[in-house]
Image (spheres, rainbow, N blue to C red):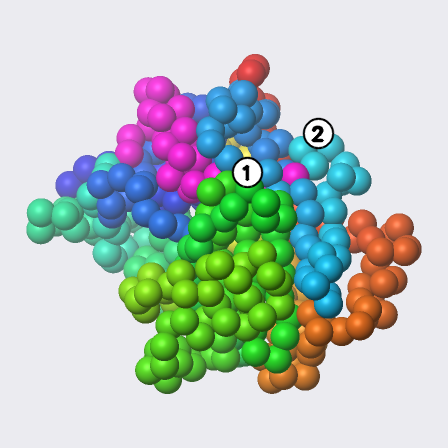
């Protein structure tokens, strides 16, 4: 049995950022990561301006800028064979007027390497948190299992669940949640990208297909929306049916109509949207998807999780250092992050109901229109409306900044 001040389950963006910030404050931190490394196809590889600002404040901006990346500055829609720019980010406030598309393993490796330079930080790989330890009703740590089958316990003043929407610690704590029905799931796959293709992101809204393509340099990262629960039935058909509706709309994809040869190339994301009534219980705090599973709409889940971690570090570091942490301090974290979570999930539910469900039902067909529909024309012509969607997606509500104790010069 080991002991630490703060035990974090999950080495994703929220867990590593929280560990780095707390370690820079001098808090003893142990992060449990069930995998041996971060080399996995996360697909959620968007790094938004709020996270880019944070990296600058942590003194990591220059190193991050050297990572292989594409910069997303616009979203386009094909309409009658022409590309219509739906949103641009060139009028965002702040120094970063783009979303960086960076493999998440590169981001995590950068953050973890920096955290491991702190003497109070420890990252245990191949180690998965499996259950909470309770004493007199309070969580006092977690049990773990290693890749080779070993088991053990780590006691802590605070245990933080950053282990995602299937969080073992969240389930073990029995925290109640509210869940909303979602009308869709997502297929993820890759197709080659040519230099002559458009740059940025390209969306498709037709009766046959709702999809979004992200420019990753030499390939497109493709998200295709399907009706909730329809994956098994659709996989009974040919995989080539995924690309056909897209190649019918834009000629520059026609040479890739048969590019998918196996359903093994298509990964399913079971879309969920929920949040815990209370993100905490005595001795345990949930952050990121463990506290609020987000829809992929807007690609904001990672960045909300990072913002959660920053707020938690600012509020909790002094309490952990002085050994005066109370449950009321965990409640402060939820209160701080409740508004951004509620606003973001509210917008996602609105888009689910008003855009995605009608599109999947064949009641919304932008790509075959003779001109952009009225809402898109208004977005283009009215400055306030034009700038609102990019700002909400890229900067969100109540962005968090690094606490003074964690800041370093670039």
Q: Which mark is residue 139?
A: none
How many angstroms separate mark 1 from mark 2 (CA)?
A: 17 Å
Task: Give the residues drawn in magenta, as a range.
Answer: 98-123
Q: Residue furthest top?
A: 409
Left or right? Give the position of 385 relative to 24.
right
The quadrant in which the N terminus is found is top left
| First in sequence: mark 1 vs mark 2 | 1
Q: Residues within 10 Å of mark 1 (few under 14, many from 20)?
A: some
Residue pictured at 69% horizontal, 60% vertical: 77
Q: In the picture, residue 373 is in which quadrant?
A: bottom right
Reading the image, the residue beneath label 1 is 70
Q: Regarding mark 1 in the picture, which secondary structure is present there?
A: strand
- Which of the two residues, 215 or 165, is positioned nearer the viewer here? 215
Residue pictured at 52% horizontal, 46% vertical: 194
Q: Regarding mark 2 in the picture, which secondary structure is present there?
A: loop
The quadrant in which the C terminus is found is top right
User: In this view of the protein, can residue 31 be seen by the observer?
Assistant: yes
* Rendered location of residue 165, percent (x, y): 41, 61
Numbered label tally: 2
Residue pictured at 62% horizontal, 56% vertical: 202
Taking the magenta stretch, the answer to whether it contains residue 129 is no
- Which of the two residues, 276 or 345, is positioned nearer the viewer here? 345
Taking the magenta stretch, the answer to whether it contains residue 121 is yes
- Which of the two residues, 388 or 5, is positioned nearer the viewer here? 388
Left or right? Give the position of 270 relative to 400.
left
Q: Residue furthest right?
A: 382
Residue pictured at 63% horizontal, 75% vertical: 206
111 above or below 335? Answer: above
* Rendered location of residue 281, percent (x, y): 42, 57
245 above or below 379? Answer: below
Q: Which mark is residue 95?
A: 2
Left or right? Give the position of 201 relative to 21.
right
């Amino acid at each position: 049995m080991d002991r630490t001040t703060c035990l974090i389950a999950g080495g994703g963006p929220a867990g590593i950022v929280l560990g780095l910030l707390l370690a820079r404050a001098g808090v003893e931190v142990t992060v449990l990561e069930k995998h041996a490394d971060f080399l996995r196809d996360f697909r959620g590889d968007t790094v938004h301006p709020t996270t880019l600002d944070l990296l600058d404040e942590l003194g990591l901006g220059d190193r991050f800028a050297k990572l292989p990346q594409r910069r997303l500055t616009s979203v386009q829609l094909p309409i009658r064979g022409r590309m219509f720019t739906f949103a641009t980010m060139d009028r965002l406030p702040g120094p970063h007027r783009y979303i960086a598309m960076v493999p998440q393993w590169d981001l995590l490796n950068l953050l973890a390497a920096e955290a491991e330079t702190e003497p109070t930080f420890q990252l245990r790989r191949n180690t998965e948190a499996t259950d909470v330890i309770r004493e007199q009703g309070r969580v006092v740590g977690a049990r773990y299992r290693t890749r080779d089958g070993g088991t053990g316990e780590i006691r802590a003043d605070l245990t933080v669940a950053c282990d995602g929407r299937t969080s073992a610690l969240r389930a073990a704590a029995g925290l109640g949640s509210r869940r909303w029905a979602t009308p869709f799931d997502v297929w993820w796959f890759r197709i080659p990208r040519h230099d002559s293709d458009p740059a940025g992101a390209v969306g498709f809204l037709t009766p046959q297909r709702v999809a979004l393509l992200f420019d990753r340099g030499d390939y497109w990262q493709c998200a295709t929306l399907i009706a909730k629960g329809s994956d098994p039935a659709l996989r009974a058909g040919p995989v080539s049916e995924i690309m056909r509706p897209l190649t019918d709309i834009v000629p520059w994809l026609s040479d890739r109509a048969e590019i998918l040869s196996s359903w093994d190339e298509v990964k399913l994301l079971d879309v969920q949207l929920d949040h815990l009534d209370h993100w905490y219980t005595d001795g345990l705090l949930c952050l990121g998807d463990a506290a609020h599973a987000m829809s992929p709409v807007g690609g904001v889940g990672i960045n909300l999780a990072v913002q959660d971690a920053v707020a938690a570090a600012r509020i909790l570091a002094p309490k952990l250092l002085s050994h005066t942490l109370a449950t009321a301090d965990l409640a402060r974290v939820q209160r701080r992050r409740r508004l951004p979570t509620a606003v973001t999930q509210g917008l996602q539910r609105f888009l689910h109901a008003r855009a995605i469900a009608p599109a999947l039902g064949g009641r919304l067909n932008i790509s075959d229109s003779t001109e952009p529909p009225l809402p898109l024309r208004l977005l283009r012509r009215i400055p306030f409306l034009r700038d609102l969607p990019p700002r909400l997606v890229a900067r969100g509500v109540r962005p968090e900044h690094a606490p003074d104790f964690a800041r370093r010069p670039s």
